[in-house]
Image: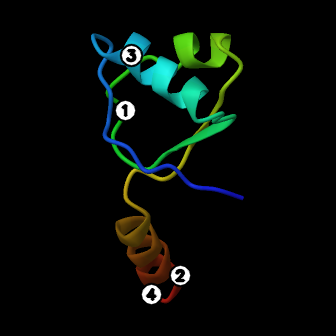
């Protein structure tokens, strides 16, 4: 398993971004930041886009605090 860490693309830079992903043989892209682009063009190129929590630490704190009230 290999990891490629990149910046957040925008719709304006998505074509170049997708080219770079294909260059590095990326087949799964995991979003860990706010969405800044439409994932459909990336998926059209055969790259699966997984959406993670927008802020996993804040989400964990929220779940913990509500569970133990």
Secondary element at image label 1: loop
What is the C-alpha distance between the residues marked 4 and 1?
A: 32 Å
Earlier sequence position, callout 2 versus callout 1: 1
What is the C-alpha distance between the residues marked 3 and 4?
A: 48 Å
Q: Is residue 33 left or right of 45 when viewed as pictured?
A: left
Picture residue at 27% right of the left edge, 10% below the top: 12
Secondary element at image label 4: loop
The nearer-to-camera label among 3 and 4 is 3
The nearer-to-camera label among 2 and 1 is 1
Q: Are marks 2 and 4 in contact (CB under 8 Å)?
A: yes
Earlier sequence position, callout 2 versus callout 3: 3
Secondary element at image label 2: helix
The quarter of the rendered structure image containing the C terminus is bottom left
The nearer-to-camera label among 2 and 3 is 3
Mark 4 neighbour class, 10 Å CA radius: few under 14, some 14 to 19, many 20 or more? few
Mark 2 sits on what residue?
67
Q: Position of residue 22 (x, y in %)?
A: 59, 25
Q: Position of residue 62 (x, y in %)?
A: 40, 71
Q: Is residue 13 left or right of 51 when viewed as pictured?
A: left
Q: Which mark, residue 35? A: 1
What is the C-alpha distance between the residues marked 2 and 3?
A: 44 Å
**Residue 9 higher or lower than 34, as above or below:** above
Residue placed farthest to the front in the image?
23
Q: Position of residue 46 (x, y in %)?
A: 71, 19
The nearer-to-camera label among 4 and 1 is 1
Mark 2 neighbour class, 10 Å CA radius: few under 14, some 14 to 19, many 20 or more? few
Earlier sequence position, callout 3 versus callout 4: 3
Mark 3 sits on what residue?
16
Earlier sequence position, callout 1 versus callout 3: 3
Secondary element at image label 3: helix
Picture residue at 49% right of the left edge, 73% below the top: 63
Mark 4 sits on what residue?
69
């Amino acid at each position: 398993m290999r990891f490629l860490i990149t910046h957040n693309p925008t719709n304006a830079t998505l074509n170049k971004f997708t080219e770079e992903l294909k260059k590095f043989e990326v087949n799964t892209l995991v979003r860990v930041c706010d969405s800044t682009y439409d994932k459909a063009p990336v998926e059209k190129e055969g790259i699966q886009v997984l959406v993670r929590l927008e802020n996993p630490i804040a989400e964990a704190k929220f779940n913990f605090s509500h569970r133990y009230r």
